[in-house]
Image (cartoon, rainbow, N blue to C red):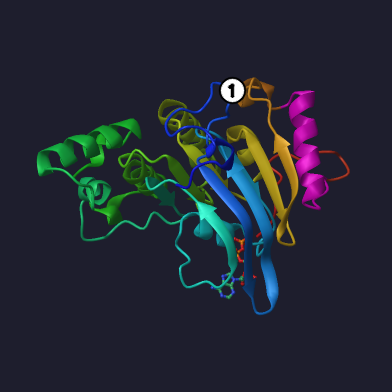
Amino acid sequence: MAPHPRLTTAAPGAPTATAPAAPAVRVGGLTRVFDDRAVLDAVDLDIAPGEFVALLGHSGSGKSTLLRAVARLDHDAGGTGTVDVPERRAVVFQDARLLPWARTLDNVTLGLGGGRAERRRLGREALAEVGLAAKENSWPATLSGGEAQRAALARALVREPALLLLDEPFGALDALTRIRMHVLLRRLCERHRPAVLLVTHDVDEALLLADRVLVLTRGRFSLDLTIDRTLDPATDRDSPAFRRLRARLLAELGVHPGADGDEEHAGVRE
Ligand code: ADP
Ligand code: MG
Protein backbone atom coordinates (compact mmCIF):
# COMPACT_ATOMS: atom_id res chain seq x y z
CA MET A 1 0.00 0.00 0.00
CA ALA A 2 1.25 3.50 -0.73
CA PRO A 3 2.24 5.43 2.39
CA HIS A 4 -0.26 7.77 3.90
CA PRO A 5 0.48 11.24 2.52
CA ARG A 6 0.54 12.74 5.99
CA LEU A 7 3.22 10.27 7.02
CA THR A 8 5.52 10.68 4.05
CA THR A 9 7.58 13.41 5.68
CA ALA A 10 8.24 11.34 8.81
CA ALA A 11 11.31 9.14 9.00
CA PRO A 12 10.56 5.68 7.62
CA GLY A 13 9.00 3.51 10.27
CA ALA A 14 8.87 6.34 12.76
CA PRO A 15 5.54 8.12 12.45
CA THR A 16 4.95 10.66 15.18
CA ALA A 17 2.74 9.67 18.08
CA THR A 18 0.06 12.11 16.96
CA ALA A 19 -0.07 10.89 13.34
CA PRO A 20 -3.29 9.06 12.55
CA ALA A 21 -2.97 5.44 11.55
CA ALA A 22 -2.69 4.95 7.81
CA PRO A 23 -6.02 3.94 6.34
CA ALA A 24 -6.50 0.34 5.26
CA VAL A 25 -8.32 1.55 2.16
CA ARG A 26 -7.70 4.78 0.30
CA VAL A 27 -9.71 5.44 -2.81
CA GLY A 28 -9.12 8.75 -4.58
CA GLY A 29 -11.08 10.33 -7.40
CA LEU A 30 -12.43 7.00 -8.61
CA THR A 31 -14.45 7.28 -11.80
CA ARG A 32 -16.07 4.45 -13.72
CA VAL A 33 -18.03 5.17 -16.87
CA PHE A 34 -20.34 2.66 -18.59
CA ASP A 35 -22.21 3.62 -21.74
CA ASP A 36 -21.42 7.31 -21.26
CA ARG A 37 -22.80 7.26 -17.70
CA ALA A 38 -20.46 7.95 -14.78
CA VAL A 39 -21.52 5.15 -12.43
CA LEU A 40 -18.79 6.36 -10.06
CA ASP A 41 -18.01 10.06 -10.31
CA ALA A 42 -14.72 10.97 -8.61
CA VAL A 43 -15.41 8.96 -5.45
CA ASP A 44 -13.09 9.33 -2.45
CA LEU A 45 -13.17 6.74 0.32
CA ASP A 46 -10.92 6.02 3.28
CA ILE A 47 -11.52 3.04 5.55
CA ALA A 48 -9.49 2.85 8.75
CA PRO A 49 -7.98 -0.43 9.94
CA GLY A 50 -10.69 -2.35 11.76
CA GLU A 51 -13.45 0.01 10.61
CA PHE A 52 -16.71 -1.50 9.35
CA VAL A 53 -18.28 0.51 6.53
CA ALA A 54 -21.65 -0.36 5.01
CA LEU A 55 -22.55 0.89 1.56
CA LEU A 56 -26.21 1.42 0.70
CA GLY A 57 -27.78 2.49 -2.55
CA HIS A 58 -30.44 1.64 -5.06
CA SER A 59 -30.02 -1.24 -7.45
CA GLY A 60 -27.73 -0.09 -10.25
CA SER A 61 -26.27 2.79 -8.22
CA GLY A 62 -22.75 1.41 -8.55
CA LYS A 63 -22.21 -0.41 -5.24
CA SER A 64 -20.78 -3.55 -6.82
CA THR A 65 -18.74 -1.47 -9.24
CA LEU A 66 -17.10 0.26 -6.28
CA LEU A 67 -16.58 -3.00 -4.39
CA ARG A 68 -15.03 -4.64 -7.44
CA ALA A 69 -12.67 -1.70 -7.86
CA VAL A 70 -11.65 -1.90 -4.19
CA ALA A 71 -11.20 -5.67 -4.59
CA ARG A 72 -9.09 -4.98 -7.68
CA LEU A 73 -11.32 -7.31 -9.67
CA ASP A 74 -12.05 -4.82 -12.44
CA HIS A 75 -8.82 -4.76 -14.41
CA ASP A 76 -10.78 -4.59 -17.64
CA ALA A 77 -12.88 -1.60 -16.56
CA GLY A 78 -11.91 1.77 -17.97
CA GLY A 79 -11.75 4.71 -15.61
CA THR A 80 -9.53 6.91 -13.54
CA GLY A 81 -8.58 7.31 -9.90
CA THR A 82 -6.42 5.56 -7.33
CA VAL A 83 -7.12 2.52 -5.18
CA ASP A 84 -4.73 1.67 -2.35
CA VAL A 85 -5.70 -1.54 -0.58
CA PRO A 86 -3.91 -4.18 1.49
CA GLU A 87 -2.56 -7.28 -0.23
CA ARG A 88 -4.40 -9.51 2.23
CA ARG A 89 -8.02 -9.08 1.25
CA ALA A 90 -10.93 -11.43 0.76
CA VAL A 91 -14.28 -11.11 -0.99
CA VAL A 92 -17.61 -12.79 -0.21
CA PHE A 93 -20.42 -12.56 -2.76
CA GLN A 94 -24.14 -13.26 -2.57
CA ASP A 95 -23.58 -16.78 -3.84
CA ALA A 96 -20.96 -18.76 -1.94
CA ARG A 97 -19.05 -19.74 -5.10
CA LEU A 98 -17.82 -23.03 -3.67
CA LEU A 99 -16.22 -25.49 -6.05
CA PRO A 100 -18.74 -28.35 -6.35
CA TRP A 101 -16.08 -31.03 -6.76
CA ALA A 102 -14.18 -30.12 -3.57
CA ARG A 103 -15.28 -30.97 -0.04
CA THR A 104 -16.04 -28.08 2.31
CA LEU A 105 -12.66 -28.10 4.07
CA ASP A 106 -10.81 -28.21 0.73
CA ASN A 107 -12.91 -25.29 -0.49
CA VAL A 108 -11.89 -23.30 2.57
CA THR A 109 -8.17 -24.04 2.22
CA LEU A 110 -7.93 -23.87 -1.56
CA GLY A 111 -5.03 -21.68 -2.62
CA LEU A 112 -3.65 -21.27 0.92
CA GLY A 113 0.12 -21.44 1.28
CA GLY A 114 1.96 -23.72 3.70
CA GLY A 115 2.04 -27.46 4.17
CA ARG A 116 -1.04 -29.65 3.85
CA ALA A 117 -1.31 -30.44 7.57
CA GLU A 118 -1.01 -26.77 8.52
CA ARG A 119 -3.53 -25.74 5.85
CA ARG A 120 -6.03 -28.30 7.15
CA ARG A 121 -5.47 -27.20 10.74
CA LEU A 122 -6.20 -23.57 9.81
CA GLY A 123 -9.17 -24.60 7.69
CA ARG A 124 -10.68 -26.63 10.53
CA GLU A 125 -10.15 -23.71 12.90
CA ALA A 126 -12.00 -21.38 10.51
CA LEU A 127 -14.84 -23.86 10.00
CA ALA A 128 -15.19 -24.21 13.77
CA GLU A 129 -15.38 -20.42 14.08
CA VAL A 130 -18.36 -20.28 11.74
CA GLY A 131 -20.01 -23.29 13.41
CA LEU A 132 -19.39 -25.66 10.53
CA ALA A 133 -16.87 -28.10 12.03
CA ALA A 134 -19.17 -31.05 11.43
CA LYS A 135 -19.38 -30.31 7.71
CA GLU A 136 -15.71 -30.40 6.76
CA ASN A 137 -16.17 -33.51 4.62
CA SER A 138 -19.50 -32.49 3.11
CA TRP A 139 -19.91 -31.67 -0.56
CA PRO A 140 -21.09 -28.11 -1.27
CA ALA A 141 -24.28 -29.40 -2.92
CA THR A 142 -25.38 -30.86 0.42
CA LEU A 143 -25.00 -27.55 2.33
CA SER A 144 -27.94 -25.23 3.00
CA GLY A 145 -27.72 -21.65 1.75
CA GLY A 146 -26.70 -20.43 5.19
CA GLU A 147 -24.10 -23.16 5.61
CA ALA A 148 -22.62 -22.39 2.20
CA GLN A 149 -22.27 -18.71 3.18
CA ARG A 150 -20.65 -19.78 6.46
CA ALA A 151 -18.15 -21.79 4.42
CA ALA A 152 -17.55 -18.74 2.22
CA LEU A 153 -16.90 -16.67 5.36
CA ALA A 154 -14.51 -19.33 6.67
CA ARG A 155 -12.69 -19.33 3.32
CA ALA A 156 -12.33 -15.55 3.62
CA LEU A 157 -11.23 -15.55 7.27
CA VAL A 158 -8.67 -18.33 6.96
CA ARG A 159 -6.62 -15.84 4.93
CA GLU A 160 -6.62 -13.40 7.90
CA PRO A 161 -7.58 -10.54 5.60
CA ALA A 162 -6.72 -6.95 6.52
CA LEU A 163 -9.68 -6.05 4.29
CA LEU A 164 -12.91 -8.00 4.03
CA LEU A 165 -15.24 -7.14 1.13
CA LEU A 166 -18.82 -8.37 1.23
CA ASP A 167 -21.26 -7.86 -1.67
CA GLU A 168 -24.81 -8.51 -0.41
CA PRO A 169 -23.55 -11.69 1.28
CA PHE A 170 -26.85 -12.47 2.99
CA GLY A 171 -29.19 -11.28 0.24
CA ALA A 172 -30.28 -14.77 -0.76
CA LEU A 173 -30.86 -16.09 2.77
CA ASP A 174 -34.15 -16.36 4.64
CA ALA A 175 -34.79 -13.81 7.38
CA LEU A 176 -33.97 -16.10 10.31
CA THR A 177 -30.70 -17.31 8.79
CA ARG A 178 -29.79 -13.72 7.96
CA ILE A 179 -30.18 -12.70 11.61
CA ARG A 180 -27.89 -15.57 12.67
CA MET A 181 -25.34 -14.50 10.06
CA HIS A 182 -25.40 -10.91 11.35
CA VAL A 183 -24.58 -12.11 14.84
CA LEU A 184 -21.82 -14.35 13.48
CA LEU A 185 -20.31 -11.63 11.28
CA ARG A 186 -20.29 -9.14 14.14
CA ARG A 187 -18.51 -11.62 16.37
CA LEU A 188 -15.97 -12.55 13.70
CA CYS A 189 -15.20 -8.91 12.94
CA GLU A 190 -14.79 -8.07 16.62
CA ARG A 191 -12.32 -10.93 16.94
CA HIS A 192 -10.32 -10.46 13.72
CA ARG A 193 -10.74 -6.70 13.26
CA PRO A 194 -10.38 -6.48 9.48
CA ALA A 195 -11.40 -3.31 7.70
CA VAL A 196 -14.77 -4.14 6.14
CA LEU A 197 -16.74 -2.84 3.19
CA LEU A 198 -20.22 -4.37 3.19
CA VAL A 199 -22.53 -3.71 0.25
CA THR A 200 -26.15 -4.14 1.18
CA HIS A 201 -29.57 -2.78 0.32
CA ASP A 202 -30.89 -3.59 3.79
CA VAL A 203 -30.95 -0.52 6.03
CA ASP A 204 -31.28 -2.54 9.23
CA GLU A 205 -28.36 -4.75 8.27
CA ALA A 206 -26.20 -1.66 7.75
CA LEU A 207 -27.26 -0.16 11.09
CA LEU A 208 -26.74 -3.42 12.91
CA LEU A 209 -23.22 -4.03 11.71
CA ALA A 210 -21.46 -0.87 10.63
CA ASP A 211 -19.43 1.88 12.28
CA ARG A 212 -20.22 4.10 9.30
CA VAL A 213 -22.93 3.95 6.65
CA LEU A 214 -22.51 5.49 3.20
CA VAL A 215 -25.26 6.05 0.65
CA LEU A 216 -24.25 6.06 -3.00
CA THR A 217 -26.42 8.29 -5.17
CA ARG A 218 -25.71 9.22 -8.78
CA GLY A 219 -22.06 8.28 -8.54
CA ARG A 220 -21.29 10.09 -5.28
CA PHE A 221 -21.74 9.53 -1.57
CA SER A 222 -24.82 11.54 -0.70
CA LEU A 223 -24.60 10.60 2.98
CA ASP A 224 -21.80 9.52 5.31
CA LEU A 225 -23.27 8.61 8.69
CA THR A 226 -21.26 7.57 11.73
CA ILE A 227 -23.09 5.06 13.91
CA ASP A 228 -22.83 5.22 17.66
CA ARG A 229 -21.55 1.73 18.36
CA THR A 230 -22.41 1.96 22.02
CA LEU A 231 -25.92 1.28 20.77
CA ASP A 232 -26.66 -2.41 21.00
CA PRO A 233 -28.83 -3.49 18.10
CA ALA A 234 -30.08 -6.44 20.13
CA THR A 235 -31.68 -4.18 22.71
CA ASP A 236 -31.72 -0.68 21.22
CA ARG A 237 -33.27 -1.61 17.90
CA ASP A 238 -36.43 0.28 18.73
CA SER A 239 -34.76 3.08 20.63
CA PRO A 240 -35.41 6.65 19.45
CA ALA A 241 -31.75 6.97 18.37
CA PHE A 242 -31.96 3.90 16.19
CA ARG A 243 -35.30 4.90 14.73
CA ARG A 244 -33.87 8.30 13.85
CA LEU A 245 -30.90 6.74 12.06
CA ARG A 246 -33.17 4.35 10.21
CA ALA A 247 -35.51 7.14 9.15
CA ARG A 248 -32.56 9.27 8.00
CA LEU A 249 -31.19 6.47 5.82
CA LEU A 250 -34.59 5.58 4.39
CA ALA A 251 -35.26 9.21 3.54
CA GLU A 252 -31.89 9.43 1.80
CA LEU A 253 -32.84 6.38 -0.23
CA GLY A 254 -36.22 7.89 -1.08
CA VAL A 255 -38.08 5.17 0.82
CA HIS A 256 -40.88 6.44 2.98
CA PRO A 257 -42.41 4.29 5.69
CA GLY A 258 -46.11 3.54 5.52
CA ALA A 259 -48.61 5.94 7.02
CA ASP A 260 -48.64 3.88 10.22
CA GLY A 261 -44.94 4.66 10.59
CA ASP A 262 -43.99 1.02 10.50
CA GLU A 263 -40.58 0.84 8.91
CA GLU A 264 -39.78 -2.63 10.24
CA HIS A 265 -37.18 -4.30 8.04
CA ALA A 266 -37.58 -1.60 5.47
CA GLY A 267 -35.03 -1.77 2.73
CA VAL A 268 -34.54 -0.81 -0.85
CA ARG A 269 -36.32 -3.06 -3.24
CA GLU A 270 -34.03 -4.57 -5.85
P1 ADP B 1 -25.34 -2.11 -7.83
O1 ADP B 1 -24.36 -3.10 -7.33
O2 ADP B 1 -25.42 -0.86 -7.01
O3 ADP B 1 -26.69 -2.69 -8.04
P2 ADP B 1 -23.62 -2.11 -10.17
O4 ADP B 1 -22.37 -1.53 -9.64
O5 ADP B 1 -23.65 -3.58 -10.39
O6 ADP B 1 -24.86 -1.61 -9.28
O7 ADP B 1 -23.95 -1.42 -11.58
C1 ADP B 1 -24.06 -0.03 -11.73
C2 ADP B 1 -24.39 0.31 -13.15
O8 ADP B 1 -23.27 0.05 -13.99
C3 ADP B 1 -25.53 -0.50 -13.74
O9 ADP B 1 -26.28 0.33 -14.55
C4 ADP B 1 -24.83 -1.58 -14.54
O10 ADP B 1 -25.63 -1.99 -15.60
C5 ADP B 1 -23.59 -0.85 -15.00
N1 ADP B 1 -22.45 -1.76 -15.19
C6 ADP B 1 -21.79 -2.39 -14.21
N2 ADP B 1 -20.77 -3.12 -14.69
C7 ADP B 1 -20.80 -2.94 -16.05
C8 ADP B 1 -19.99 -3.39 -17.13
N3 ADP B 1 -18.94 -4.21 -16.91
N4 ADP B 1 -20.32 -2.98 -18.38
C9 ADP B 1 -21.36 -2.15 -18.58
N5 ADP B 1 -22.15 -1.68 -17.62
C10 ADP B 1 -21.87 -2.05 -16.35
MG1 MG C 1 -24.59 -5.12 -6.82
Q: Does the magenta stretch include residue 239?
A: yes
Q: Residue furthest bottom?
A: 35
Of residue 56 and residue 21, the one placed in the foreground of this image is 21
Q: Residue at x 45, y 62 (%)?
A: 73
The answer to which image quadrant residue 257 occupies is top right
Q: Residue at x 84, y 46 (%)?
A: 258
The answer to which image quadrant residue 140 occupies is bottom left
Disc 1 secondary structure class: loop
Total labels drawn: 1
Is 61 rendered above or below residue 131? Answer: below
Q: Taking 260 as reference, is 16 left or right?
A: left
- Residue 259: horizontal and vertical position, in percent? 88, 44
The residue identified by callout 1 is: 18
- Residue 270: horizontal and vertical position, in percent? 65, 60
Majority secondary structure of magenta residues: helix
- Residue 138: horizontal and vertical position, in percent? 22, 48
Of residue 14 and residue 41, the one placed in the foreground of this image is 14
Of residue 156 and residue 87, the one placed in the foreground of this image is 87
- Residue 127: horizontal and vertical position, in percent? 28, 37
Q: Can residue 169 be seen in this view?
A: no
Q: How crowded is mark 1: few (under 14 residues within 10 Å), some or many (20 or more)?
A: few
Stretch in magenta: 238-257
Of residue 220 and residue 42, the one placed in the foreground of this image is 42
**Disc 1 residue type?**
Thr
Q: Residue at x 46, y 59 (%)?
A: 72
The answer to which image quadrant residue 42 occupies is bottom right
Q: In which quarter of the image is ligand 1?
A: bottom right
Q: Is residue 16 magenta?
A: no
Q: Taking 136 as reference, is 171 left or right?
A: right
